[in-house]
Amino acid sequence: MARNVERRAALADAGLRVLAATGARGLTHRAVDAEAGVPVGTASNYFRSRDALLGALGERIMERFAPDEHRLAELAAREPSLELVTDYVRYIVERTTAQPELTRALIELRLEAVRRPGLARVLGETLRRGYRDDVAFHVAAGLPGGAFEVALLRYAVDGLLLDLLGTSIDAGFDPDEVVSALVSRLLAPAR
């Protein structure tokens, strides 16, 4: 496997642009090469199979969605409360809607994983690790709720993001108000 970390990241970013624009069917090693402006065969040198390419895209999405440490530190300095959880969730929605192509690519990957067991294994590991990290953070920060409530919030936010970045139901509600309601209603019993 090729070892140039920067080129691997650039190829993954090109793959994410292709995936977001054309869906999983349009994602090929050649399309990634063309999008990245590299010689034909470069992407297949870094990602030997389609599942390896798709799995690397999932990992790259999570890298690019990583929160800003300064912003997290500001939030972590506050007292644990429903309002703090609301602000954390708002920050998640802010990060994921600021990079809509990444969120759309992640949705595409999750759907493609239904049809590709190899991708389901790799992507599933990445998603489960993210969930475990979220639960550990939530508990360590002393926030209301636990693993179940974090799962509920993730399920709800995924639906909100799908509506914001896909074909919407156009219910007319402000996303910020939706986040506030989700947190207060899902975590109120956990106080």
Image (cartoon, rainbow, N blue to C red):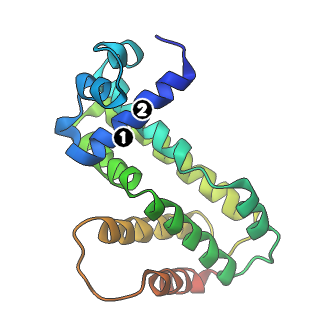
The residue that appears at 49% across and 82% down in the rendered structure is 176
Amino acid at dot 1? Leu
**Number of marks in picture:** 2
For residue 122, say whether it is visible: no
144 up-or-down from 122: above or below: below
Amino acid at dot 2? Ala
Crowding at dot 2, Cα within 10 Å, few <14 / some 14-19 / many 20+, comes out as many
Per the image, label 2 sits on a secondary structure element best described as helix
| Quarter of the figure that contains the C terminus | bottom right
- Whether the residues at callouts 1 and 2 have beta carbons within 8 Å, the answer is yes
Per the image, label 1 sits on a secondary structure element best described as helix
The residue that appears at 75% across and 58% down in the rendered structure is 70
* Front position in the image: 52 or 61: 61
Where is residue 54 drawn, in percent x and y? 34, 33
The numbered dot on residue 53 is none
Residue 139 lies left or right of residue 90; in this view the side is right
Where is residue 29 drawn, in percent x and y? 27, 23
Where is residue 47 drawn, in percent x and y? 38, 19
Residue 135 lies left or right of residue 1; in this view the side is right
Which residue is denoted by mark 2 in the rendering? 12
The residue that appears at 75% across and 65% down in the rendered structure is 141
71 up-or-down from 183: above or below: above
For residue 124, say whether it is visible: yes
Which residue is denoted by mark 1 in the rendering? 16
| Quadrant assignment, res 118 | top left
Residue 28 lies left or right of residue 129; in this view the side is left
